[in-house]
Amino acid sequence: MYDDYVAHFKKYSQLYGPKTAIFLQVGKFFEFYDILDPDPQTTCKEIADLLAIKLLNKGPTGREGLWSGIPTQSLHTFAMRLTLQGWTCVIFEESKDLRGKITRHMTRILSPGTHLETADSMESMFLATVWLQEELWKPPTFGASALDLTTGQSVSYQGTAVGRTDTWSADDLLQFFQVYPPRECVVYWSGQALTAPEEGFLRSRLALPTTAIHIKPAPSIATPDDTFMRIFKPKTLLPIREYLHLQSAPLCINSLASLLRFVDEHFPSFQEHLPKHGLWVPEESVYLGNNVLTQINFLDVLNLFMKTNTQMGRRAMRQRLLYPIRSIQTLEGRLEEITKISQMPKEKKQQIHSLLQKISDLPRIHRKIQTFKVSAADVLALEQSYVYTKKLLELLGGEQIDEYIKTFKVTFSTEKACRSNEDLFFLPDDKGPETAVAEKALAALNLEAEAILEKVRAWSSLPEAALKMEGYTVTGSKTTLQKIKTRLSHSTMTPSPYPGITVTDRKSGGNLNIPALEEVHTKIMRLREEIQGLFERELPPVCSAFADSSFEIWSFIEDWLAALDVTVTLERVCTERGFVRPELVDGSTGSIDIEGLRHPLIEAQATRLEYVKHSVTLDANGWLLYGMNASGKSSLMKSVGISVLLAQCGCFVPATRLRLSPYGSVFTRILNHDNLWAGLSSFAVEMTELREILLKVDSKSLVLGDEVCSGTESTSATSLVAAALTWLKDKQASFLFATHLHGLMNLKAVTDAVQVWHLRVRYDPKTGVLTYDRSLQKGAGSSMYGLEVARALNLPFEFLEKAQAFRHELLGTAPEDSDQTQSSWKVQRRACELCQHPLVSDIEIHHIRPQKEAGETGHFADGTHKDHLRNLIAVCQNCHDKHHAGLLDIQPVKQTSEGPVRVSDVLQQNDVKVIKSKWTVEQQATIINLLKQKPTAPLQRLLFELDEYHGIKMSSSTLQKIRKVGKM
């Protein structure tokens, strides 16, 4: 056994690397072995450590070894711990032939992308392959494919990297993986082994820091069409490559074929018949250069919207917001859908959200039907989901699905599914005739078993619940069994109803042995084995026929529900945050005009600091933005990019007004991102990224640059930035560059090409306080501020004095003057924020801007909510009266280098009493009766029936508690 285990490990670790685990079934355990010869030969010890299971020093005869194991029923519980950490688990299961000989065969390989049992109900589970084709003296070309085994969705993309042969990037491929994030990625390198990319380089290029990545030599793909025909089973006269949209994508053919073969190797029992394959077409989207989504923190913005009601909607939201498009017609359609939802009555919107929340993950359940893995719980979940979908369609005036629901109920019996157990399945009698016969036979045997027990109970004169039947065993208390013993001892007077009845005593109670009952139980067990085989034989043709006839309506329902969920979620989040609908115009060049621009992430922070909003106009004349460190240049630049991408995804934006002529491409060059090129200095990275921007930019491009050329000396940096600005001006691109290079103001070509702005920060030389006003001001502002920031950060006084002397010697300094008062960081309710008078009984929380100026949603015209912390202040009655009399002006909170002025802690909220819901006597009886009638029905099914058929609403935890205690 040990030698076989070591041989298996050596074979599969060569294929899948050192993080390989062999699970070898021996009886009721999966076991792990190792031979110390003298060093370990397998990963047995690592597995035991990771799984926190016992490890024994136990080896084959005459040799030292290690042994560990887990119960067979816990396979996926333990294997999941390994696959989630990037391990590959090879499963060997045993089988017996007719003579009882045991053999072990590899039945499945569990890896991060194929371990379906670990699928998170809220996430996609994509497995991906990339086929990299080496090109002579050029960066590689590639084909990429991704497959979600839980839904059957598959998509591919073909493109060409940019850069050099040894240091290249592929922003379109990076975006592909952001839209379809893989848990596991296999990279096939078609080129010389010495030039194959390293794992770290690929992680950087593809932004896959935690994904399990395997790099393999490209295999020979001899007959991909045969693989495609077997897996997709197209019912069309079209050639298979044309059916899959692969006729002009040869590298996608290789990547998809190798992906399907990888699945075959890992999942031999995987059922084919995947839905139709699609191509990802970035030409219809906005080109995102230099990892834009990461550099402007758009992935974090995405999290603000990941509050969908369904799992379908969650996946669709990711694809919507990470795939900005150019089509004004499509965008206007999306925006109009959000507008219509926003205009609905509040009750109707709540009804839509409530119905969506009750709908299951339909694509995954439909996939189970296609793979013949559907269960009784799935059938019930589908019925509930279809009922709620029908209500949504009726509510919103969509296409009805009544005929489909009738077909579904004819195909699967929801009544049997609700009572399903090991003796009863969910196929109607006409769909599974042999299974139905066996079900009836089992029902008769179960009745016979109950009759036998009842006859024994009556003979013993025992109360109704005195004897309990658990499988083969009949149990009872000591008192009960003593009565039966007494009866048996007088059997000549009252003979027992069945011969051979005996009693086995235990410490507490005992067992009653009834041979006649054991005979019935033996028949039941044999028939249960038989019925499982009958059901597994009759289910596939039923599922296949139903799937073939229902594919179109499935696609309609899934797509419609996902789109609806995305729309209502976007509307809810945008309304909560005061976002506005952008105005789209069709212009020959890209442009944007924003008023009251806000950064959604910074705005979401719970702080009393005044949030400064900005107005930005970018067209053929770009902006050059100056500002002191931490003045907000990067935040302003990112907020512009975020609003543009949100608008071009068909979403409202964080501003008071936005007018946009859509862009075809967006580029960023922002410091401190993770996309560094192996072997190159930071300045070389800048120049390589800048090169891509200069070559691809046009009049439909938006370029955002933060401190470009900061990695070299100032003269060259000023020259390079000046050249870039004039280049972009000539290309009529929109651009916003943040910089500290004040020497640019000495170049007339630059000042003629750009608008110059700065973010104001005031410095008080008397107190040494920096006040971050952050308002946009014309011009470049002061060019001397580094020492002021250093002083605010409390660097040593003597050091700062020396630096000041050197600066005076070189250039001199001219700080801006301003008056500013200070305040403690946290405002307590025990003091007035304005006069610092101790808290008295008349202290109150005052709205700085009157509530009446807010709209219906509670937002002011600039998007700020009336109840936001920024608009609240604790004041005494005296200051409150002065303010309303016009004698006292309340100013907003300002950020200073020594902390913000006039801020308070979060206001205390009074506890709200929760009133428990009550049910009438009739409703209580209905709930208890339903629990008694259907003791094995899933909890969600019972909740569905109570709501749908009786109008009773309650939480799952409440119903679970009632079921547990047996009463209200």
Image (cartoon, helix red, strand yellow):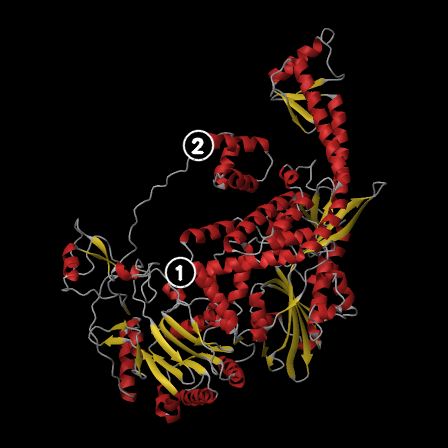
The circle on residue 384 is: none
Q: Position of residue 11 (x, y in %)?
A: 75, 60
Query: How many neighbours does mark 1 have within 10 angstroms: few (below 14), some (14-19), or many (20 or more)?
Result: some
Which residue was labeled with disc 1?
Answer: 575
> 38 or 966, which is in the foreground?
966
The amino acid pointed to by label 1 is Thr
SS at circle 1: helix
**For the point 52% across and 84% down, which residue is it?**
691
Expressed as whole percent of the image width and height from the top left, the position of residue 476 reads 63, 21
Q: Residue furthest top?
A: 493
**Residue drawn at x 51%, y 72% as measured from the top left:** 329
Q: Quadrant of residue 657?
A: bottom left
Question: Disc 2 vs disc 1: which is toward the camera?
Answer: 2
Instruction: Give the side of residue 253 with respect to residue 662, left or right.
Output: right
Q: Is residue 228 above or below residue 268?
A: below
**Badge 2 or badge 1: first in the primary sequence:** 1
Label 2 is placed on what type of residue?
A: Thr
Q: Position of residue 488 (x, y in %)?
A: 70, 12
Label 2 crowding class (10 Å Cα cut-off): few <14, some 14-19, many 20+?
Answer: few
- Answer yes or no: is residue 61 visible: no
Q: Nearer the viewer, residue 792 or 954?
A: 954
Image location (x, y in percent) of residue 451: 70, 22
Q: Which residue is mark 2?
A: 920
* Vertical order, 208 against 800 (above or below): above
| Cα gap from disc 2 to disc 1, whole angstroms | 38 Å
Q: Is residue 900 left or right of residue 260?
A: left
